[in-house]
Amino acid sequence: MKLLEEVQLKLVSSLKGKDLLTLLDYTSEEVQDLVKLATNLKVLTKAGKCPKLLEGKTLGMLFEKHSTRTRISFEVGMNQLGGKAMFMHSRDLQIGRGEPISDTGKVLSGYLDAIMIRANSHEMVKELAEHATIPVINGLTDIYHPCQALADLETIAENKVELKGLKVAFVGDGNNVAHSLVVACAHVGMNISVATPPGYECNAEIIAKAQEIAKANGSTVTVTNDPIEAVTDADVIYTDVWTSMGQEEESAKRLVDFKDYQINDALVAHAKPNYMFLHCLPAHREEEVASSVIDGPNSFVFEQAENRLHAQKAVLVSLLA
């Protein structure tokens, strides 16, 4: 394609027409190439040269959950690439009145070029992908958040240059963000240590799969209940809210169970002096993270949030262009 040659951009062509449900479905090379593509698209965008690779394409964005970064980054990303994005909340569609998601997938496939869905259930997203004949992108489910993990890798790569061999520490709930981060780190050869309170560990099957990928890339995935062990000599420290959407009734208990897992000055003192702090946002200051950390010089959370835009564009052009 002449336009690609003009901007010297290489798409991840092996992903064309595929879904993005979890990074477990992608090869390590594909994940690494997506990160490089996201970085290159960011450079082009900043220079005012974002290629209109998706002109005439329409992305349907289906939401069951609230969203800031996911909705805006996908919508702006499609606009910058020359396409269009359509917001759809589940309560406004017939699935809000009981239409099977399988029927919805077949119908939307006749109108759209791709579907991005932010849903409560990963099983629902899998069913949608099974029946849709267009690519389905997981914008977040109860188990995975792959688009966030790609932006995380992009942010680390921009600031640490070489990913392989770095140590990432995730401290907090073994949730969807942790699951996708573990898999992403394994794909690029980063060592990751996940520290959770007892009873809040990551899914054991996902950890086992990530460990297999990590082994092939010369890195490790470890789990612990000790936040100091996880953070010691870390290059990157990452956390998420202690109570995710849909868990509000557990909030009081979680505040007690997670009280020793706050990212604060005492904990980050065990990391490398030039550590990066990351958080997928929104953040609850003085709960999972102290204000002195998230608003301090080692915090890259807003660059990380911006990179959702460029990571999303890398996915969109690879699946659709």
Image (cartoon, helix red, strand yellow):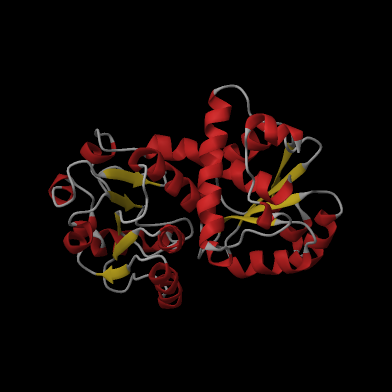
Write down the quadrant of residue 124 in the picture.
bottom right
Which image quarter holds the N terminus?
top right
Q: Is residue 177 left or right of residue 37?
A: left
Give the residue drawn at x 57%, y 63%.
26
Which image quarter holds the C terminus?
top right
Q: Residue 154 location, x and y as percent?
A: 45, 44
- Give the camera-side residue of 235 and 283: 235
Q: Residue 4 location, x and y as percent?
A: 69, 36
Give the residue drawn at x 81%, y 37%.
56
Residue 17 can be seen in this image: yes
Q: Is residue 116 left or right of residue 297?
A: right
Q: Residue 135 location, x and y as percent?
A: 72, 56
Q: Residue 170 location, x and y as percent?
A: 31, 57
Check the image and name the residue furthest to the top: 48
**204 over 88 or under it: above or below:** below
Q: In this view, does 71 lie to the left or right of 205?
A: right
- Give the camera-side residue of 69 and 148: 148
- Give the camera-side residue of 70 and 55: 55
Write down the quadrant of residue 123 in the picture.
bottom right
Residue 68 can be seen in this image: no
**218 over 165 or under it: above or below:** below
Check the image and name the residue furthest to the right: 110
- Give the camera-side residue of 233 and 244: 233
Give the residue drawn at x 35%, y 58%.
190
Give the residue drawn at x 56%, y 43%.
37
Q: How many marks?
A: 0
